Amino acid sequence: MKKRLIIIFMLLIIISLTGCTPNDGTYTLDSPAGFWWGMWHGWIAGINLIRSLFNPEIGIYETINNGGWYNFGFLLGISTLSSSGSRPSRNRSKYSK
């Protein structure tokens, strides 16, 4: 029962994360995507990459953006996810002495 709840919870999170995908027509030249949307799109880039394999209309990067700030947010969003597993282990083995 607990495994089912975890799976349902994870599916709900994935569905809610993909609600605001890039290139969905929300942004215009008068109202381009900014820093915070760039960070959000960076965080969900992995999910959107997988989705874009099955649906060519889905992108991982918003083309209507405000330039440098969107790019910085996108890069920051991707880097926060990819750097989470790169910390060295604090546990030392008994053989490293």
Image (cartoon, helix red, strand yellow):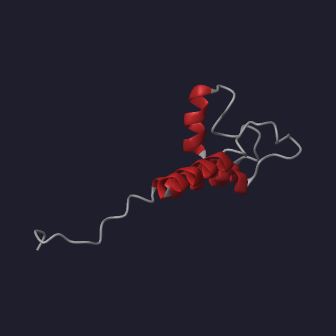
**What residue do we see at 89% from left, 44% from top?**
30
How far across and how far down the image is residue 55, in percent? 64, 27
**What residue do we see at 45% from left, 60% from top?**
84
Residue at the far front in the pictured view: 1
How far across and how far down the image is residue 26, in percent? 82, 41
Q: Quadrant of residue 95?
A: bottom left
Horizontal side of residue 8 vs 86, given as left or right: right
Horizontal side of residue 90 vs 65, given as left or right: left
Position of 24 relative to 41 (above/below) = above
**What residue do we see at 59% from left, 26% from top?**
54
Give 52 or 73, whichever is nearer the viewer.
Answer: 52
Residue 75 showing in the rendered view = no
Q: Quadrant of residue 9?
A: bottom right
Give 20 or 10, whichever is nearer the viewer.
Answer: 10
Residue 57 showing in the rendered view = yes
Residue at the far right in the pictured view: 30
Horizontal side of residue 60 vs 4, given as left or right: right
How far across and how far down the image is residue 7, in percent? 53, 50
Q: Quadrant of residue 53?
A: top right
How far across and how far down the image is residue 66, in percent? 76, 47
**What residue do we see at 74% from left, 36% from top?**
23
Position of 75 relative to 56 (above/below) = below
Q: How many marks?
A: 0
Horizontal side of residue 33 vs 55, given as left or right: right
Viewport quadrant of the C terminus: bottom left
